[in-house]
Image: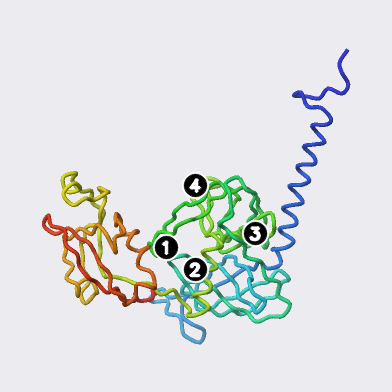
Amino acid sequence: MPDPDRQPDGLTPDNHASDAELLDAYSRAVTAAVDRVGPAVVRIEVEHGPAPGQISQPATGRHRRGGSGSGFVFTHDGLVLTNSHVVHGATAIRVILQDGRELAADLVGDDPDTDLAIVRVTASDLVPALLGDSSALKPGQLVIAIGNPFGFQTTVTAGVVSALGRTLRSRSGRLMDNIIQTDAALNPGNSGGPLVSSRGEVIGVNTAVILPAQNLCFAIPSNTAIQVATLLIRSGRIRRAYLGIGGQHVRLHPRILRAHGLGSQDALMVVQVEPGSPAQTAGIKDGDIVVAFEDQPITTVDDMHRLLSEERIGSRARLSVLRRGQRIEVDVVPAESSPRD
C-alpha cells in the first residue's frame, strides 16, 4: 500500500518545510535590503543639445535629445552617485525621487575613465544609502540590483556575485579593473543604480551588460566608487598623468629577453609621440619599445594607464626602453592630462 507521507522525487514533508524556510529567509533578505536602500534610488533624466535659452539648429542636426538612467543618494545633503555615461555632456539633469518629487540637479563631477559621476540635488528628508566594503565580497554571494530599466521606477532583481576581478573597457577607452560580475538582471536604464548586499549595503554601481548574452552584468565596486567620489567632490574631476605616446602591443624575441634579463615577451612599442608632450621632451622616439616604468613591467597601454596616477604628475620617473637592440633609461616628467569632453 502506498505510503501517504511519501512525496514525489523522494521528498518528505520535512524536506518541503526546509525548502519553504529557505525561500522565506531568501525573501526576507531581499525585501529587507530593498526596504533599506530603495528610498535612496532615483531616476535620472537628462537632456543633450543646446543649453536652455539657446536656439536649436535643425540644419546641423543639433536637436535637444534625452536619456535616462538610475542613481542613488549617498549623503544627507543631496549627493547622488551614478554612471558617467548617464550624465556625461548633459545640458540639463533632473532627478526623480522615489516619492515622486522631481528636482533639478547640478553636475558635481564626472569621470569617464571609471564611468562614475556625482550630481547634487537640494531637498529635505533624503534617505541616503550606505556604501559597504566591496573587498569582502565572495563569488556566490546574494546581491540585489535596484534601478529604473526602461523607466520602470524602482525595479528589483536578485542574483549572485558571479565573479570578481573582471576587467571592462570604459567608454573613454581605458580599462576598468576589479569589476564585479553578477547575474542579477540589468537592462537599459539600470545604469548607475546600486548593487546591494543582503545586509542592505551598496557594494557596487551597476554599469553594463553584454548583449545578446543573458545575465552577464557588471558593476563598479563600491570601494572604487568611494575613492572616485572623494576626488570628484574635492575637485570635480580625477587628475591623471600622461606621457603623450601612442603604442601597440608587441612580442619580443626570446633572444632579446635573455640579452636584457626581461621576464615577459610582451611589451609596448611606441607608434606615435605627441608634439610638445612629456615623451617628446624626454626624447622618446617612434619605434622605441617600452618595457618598464619605474621598474614596473609594461606589457600593454593599459599597464601604462594604471601607473600614470595623479601622484605622478610633475614627478620625474624612469622609463626603460629598447632602441635598436640596446636598453636605455630615459627620465620623463609626466604632465597632467586634459579633461575629456
At 57% across and 46% down in the image, what residue appears? Answer: 139
- Separation of disc 3 and disc 4 at Cα? 21 Å
> Counting residues from the N terminus, which is met first, the one under dot 2 or under dot 4?
2
Which residue lies under the disc numbered 4? 212
- Separation of disc 2 and disc 4 at Cα? 23 Å
- Separation of disc 1 and disc 3 at Cα? 23 Å
Q: Amino acid at mark 1?
A: Arg
At 50% across and 80% down in the image, what residue appears? Answer: 234
Q: Position of residue 177 (x, y in %)?
A: 45, 57
Please, is residue 332 above or below residue 51 in the view? above
Q: Nearer the viewer, mark 2 or mark 4?
A: 2
Q: Amino acid at mark 2?
A: Ser
User: Circle 2 sits in a helix, a strand or a loop, which is it?
Assistant: helix
Res 171 label: 1
Dot 1: few (<14), some (14–19), or many (≥20) neighbours within 10 Å? Answer: few
> Counting residues from the N terminus, which is met first, the one under dot 1 or under dot 3?
3
Q: Nearer the viewer, residue 299 or 84?
A: 299
> Counting residues from the N terminus, which is met first, the one under dot 3 or under dot 4?
3
- Separation of disc 3 and disc 2 at Cα? 18 Å
Which residue lies under the disc numbered 3? 146
Dot 4: few (<14), some (14–19), or many (≥20) neighbours within 10 Å? Answer: few
Q: Quadrant of residue 69?
A: bottom right
Quadrant for the N terminus in the image: top right
Q: Quadrant of residue 325?
A: bottom left
Res 127 label: none
Asked if marks 3 and 4 touch (Cβ < 8 Å), the reply is no
Which residue lies under the disc numbered 2? 84
